[in-house]
Image: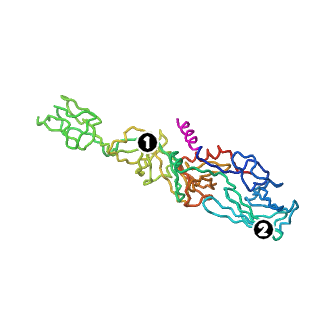
Amino acid sequence: MKTTMNKKLVLILAPFLWLGGCGNEAATDVEAAGSHEAGETDAFERGPHGGRLLEQDGFTVELAIFETGVPPEFRAWVTQDGAAVAPEAAQLTVELARLGGTVDRVAFAPSGEFLRGNREVSEPHSFDVKVAASFGGRNYQWAYESHEGRTRIVAEVAEASGIGTAIAGPGSITETLRLFGSIVPDATRVREIRARFPGVIRSVARQVGDRVRAGDTLAIIESNESLQEYAVTAPLSGVITRRHAEPGEQTDSDSLFEIADFTRVWAEFNAFPRDRPRLREGLKVRVSTDGGITAETVLRYLSPTGDRSMQSVTARVVLENPDALWVPGEFVEARVTLSETPVALAVPLSALQTFRDFNVVFAQVGDEYEVRMLDLGRRDSEQVEVLGGLEPGTVFVSRNSYLIKADIEKSGASHDH
């Protein structure tokens, strides 16, 4: 059912999406400094070095992004009427306007037989490009779009499809230890009730499962010595869990009733001895059931000795249970927080997608969404540290990001190398 629903969401999005991406023609060492619209076979003319040809009145610049063995950089080759122009004879600048308003300015200097850009072309290679050149006393200008991993979704469709966003900011990476155990009664809230004086049980007022309050009468006993009747009463409020009393029976030192107060219970877990040095009282613990009941508490007790048969030590937490959600005997899981490390920038694992060879999230600017290639660090079960590729304060897709990726892939546009 989930797979079917996901497909339907993608289909709903399709009529409203627009994608501009890089072309599909491959070059060996360079990426053409341009793009193909989805469905086009060749949106621009290529030069002998695999770059984009920009021509005006016989003056031609071949512009490419070179990234074999070096960080991505612009390289340009210049000709006049088909004849090579010495790199030092021409001047060239490029402006890259990125989604969100950032503009990268690239100046060029001679490097052997070509002009070389003075800065790395950071990912994604998605921008609106302005090229300015001068040669022989004349100036030349070109402008074009080179979009990669970008799509447009109107706000109403994004909301209807469940696409959620968050603002990139600090977080913490948590080291946890997973333990398994069960709910048990709080031993300090369990009482065995016995007769004060030997005698004959004349009546029993309560049954197993009955709830009682402190002071309620449980049974009437006739004393063997005084022949007077006296009441056996509940010493605390709780539930009768055991009864060993029947009218006409003779009492002795054995227990007549057991009462347990389940408004507070314990969760006891088995920890391997190798994990014992990592545990200490006071650590935060998240307890959960298969049914989705959870609670935040702290580690209250660690057994000083191990269970030889189980090859484990006991770790215990206390759970308030006024609504009887935690049932003794029920199996539960614990995640013990061993450490929390603050990080300057983190994103939820659910936001991550893959694009080419990168882990990415999708930044949102208005109705447009675009990949952000990430350099990742430490992670836990929920978050991952971001070391680069995403600016703090960026709005990014945190929920249903697979819909953005699906539309980009469906459009058939890709990074052009």
Question: In this rendering, which labeled residue sits more in front, label 2 or label 1?
Answer: 2
Above or below, 163 relative to 117? above
Looking at the image, tell me whether mark 2 or mark 1 is earlier in sequence order.
Answer: 2
**Residue 37 place in picture, x, y as percent:** 70, 49
Mark 2 closeness class: few <14, some 14–19, many ≥20 residues within 10 Å = few
- Residue type at numbered disc 2: Asn
Q: Quadrant of residue 321?
A: top left
Residue displayed at 68% across by 49% down: 357
Q: Residue furthest bottom?
A: 137
Q: Is residue 191 above or below residue 105?
A: above
From the viewer's side, name the closer residue of 82 and 217: 82
Q: Is residue 91 visible?
A: no
Q: Is residue 75 visible?
A: yes
Q: Which residue is mark 2?
A: 139
- Front residue of 5/273: it is 5
| Colour scheme shown | rainbow
Amino acid tagged 1: Gly
Q: Is residue 5 magenta?
A: yes
The kind of secondary structure element at disc 1 is loop
Dot label at residue 292: 1
Label 2: element kind: strand
Q: Position of residue 281 (x, y in %)?
A: 43, 53
Nearer-the-camera pick, 238 or 82: 82
Which portion, as a residue range, is magenta?
1-13
Look at 16% across and 35% down and name the residue there.
Answer: 220
The answer for how far apart the CA atoms under marks 2 and 1 are is 68 Å
